[in-house]
Amino acid sequence: MSDRVLRNTLYFTFFYNLMGFVTFIAPQRFGGVAGLPYDVPFLYNGFIAFNILLFGIVGLWQARQTVMNAPVLVIFGISKITFCGLMLVSWIGGDVALPGFLMSLVDFAMGLIFLQGARNAPSGLSRQN
């Protein structure tokens, strides 16, 4: 995997997560596209939305670093693949519409890229100034 593909995916995840943030923070207005339920307490939507935003900001930070951080990439990879799995289970259970699950396949693909990038990154936490 090239450094360019990994960095471009990290930049993309920033913008993709911004879209996710908006979708989850205002599900009545934007969640319909993903088939998300909107009649849940704001605490749940808000918590998920701000975690999505946080991941996006960390992704942007990682993309701008000179050295990739393997633990960050592993956490990103696992979280993206897990989200896709949760969307699959939610779709099977009737909690989200098929388009929501299909959109989460983008997360799955990014997760694979991040895990592959972690394999090529330094294994420890590198000290960066």
Image: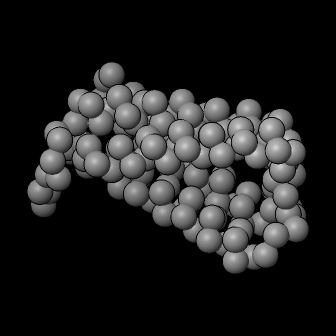
**Residue 81 in the image: x percent, y percent?**
53, 39
Q: Residue at x 62, y 71 (%)?
A: 47
Image quarter in which the C terminus is found: bottom left
Q: Quadrant of residue 116?
A: top left
**Residue 73 in the image: x percent, y percent?**
35, 44
Residue 23 appears in the rendering: yes
**Residue 8 in the image: x percent, y percent?**
43, 35
Q: Residue at x 63, y 65 (%)?
A: 49
Q: Residue at x 64, y 32 (%)?
A: 105
The image shows residue 39, relative to residue 119, as above or below, that is below
Q: How many marks?
A: 0
Q: Which colour scheme appears in the figure?
A: one colour
The image shows residue 87, relative to residue 125, as above or below, that is above
Image quarter in which the N terminus is found: top left
Query: Residue at the top extreme?
Result: 1
Q: Quadrant of residue 109?
A: top right
Residue 6 appears in the rendering: no
Along the line of sight, which residue is nearer the eye, 74 or 93? 93
85 relative position to 101: left or right: left
**Residue 13 in the image: x percent, y percent?**
51, 44
Q: Residue at x 33, y 50 (%)?
A: 72
Along the line of sight, which residue is nearer the eye, 96 or 68? 96
